[in-house]
Image: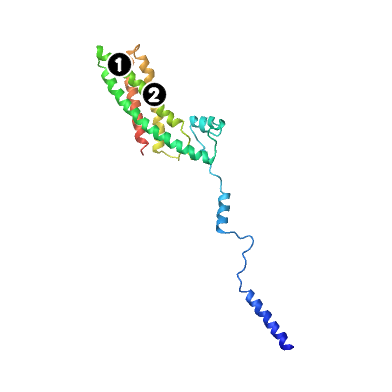
Amino acid sequence: MLKTLVALLFLSLSMQAQDTTRVAAPPADSLSADQLLAGLTDSLPAQPLLPSKMLFTQRVFWGPKGLLRVMDVAPLTPEGREKELKVRRTMLVAHQVMGFVTLAGFVVQGILGAKLYTAQGEQYTRLYNAHEISAAFINVAYGTTALLSLTAPPKLVADRRGLSGIKLHKYLAVVHLAGMVATNVLAGMIRQHPDLKPYHRAVAYTTFGAFAASIIAIKF
């Protein structure tokens, strides 16, 4: 009988020893790496869909309460913004192409204008008509170029601080836009005030210089 009790006790101790070799179950509050990463991602602030700063023309169309949002043409969603960025890229490529077309028009206009100052008689009439057609073409091309940029969907983030090629391009755009307005105003006054011709020429050359510089700046 004693031997039987000793054997049972030994068997019980042996089974307990085997149980201690088992891998302990993870605590209930432990998480996997994927779960931890998911939790970290959820705790981060959401990426804003629109930049904090936009052009007035962009805000009118693409702002949180812009026309395209109100009309439900372009809902403000992550998927919608992804499509808008593709539209933005296409519009800015077209903006660059039209910029070179406008620049070529400026060159032609400059050549015609220089000849017009010394032309007389029938040659003057011919050059004047060509100059007027060229001016109309430039105005349309310039307006199209500007609208492609001003009405393009906004980028995801605002521009970085400090001077950059993009910011220089924008500053020069203000200069050549003012020059375009002044050039057209002076052109309409020259017939009644011929003494304004030198000012018209100076403003036109300044506008051309600012426009050419803005195209160069965008490449840097």
Looking at this view, is 63 or 10 the one in front? Answer: 10
Q: Residue at x 43, y 28 (%)?
A: 147
Q: Position of residue 162 (x, y in %)?
A: 43, 39
Q: Position of residue 14 (x, y in %)?
A: 65, 80
Furthest-right residue in this view: 1
Secondary structure state at the residue bearing disc 2: helix
- Image position of 126 (left or right of 41): left
Q: Quadrant of the C terminus?
A: top left
Q: Amino acid at mark 2?
A: Val
Looking at this view, is 67 or 103 the one in front? Answer: 67
Q: Position of residue 160 (x, y in %)?
A: 45, 40
Circle 1 residues within 10 Å: few <14, some 14–19, many ≥20: some
* Residue 112 can be seen, yes or no: yes
Tell us which disc is closer to us: 2 or 1: 2
Indicate whether 189 appears above or below 169: above
Image colouring:
rainbow
**Mark on residue 128?**
1
Q: Quadrant of the N terminus?
A: bottom right
Task: Name the image quarter holding residue 123.
Answer: top left
**Mark on residue 140?**
2
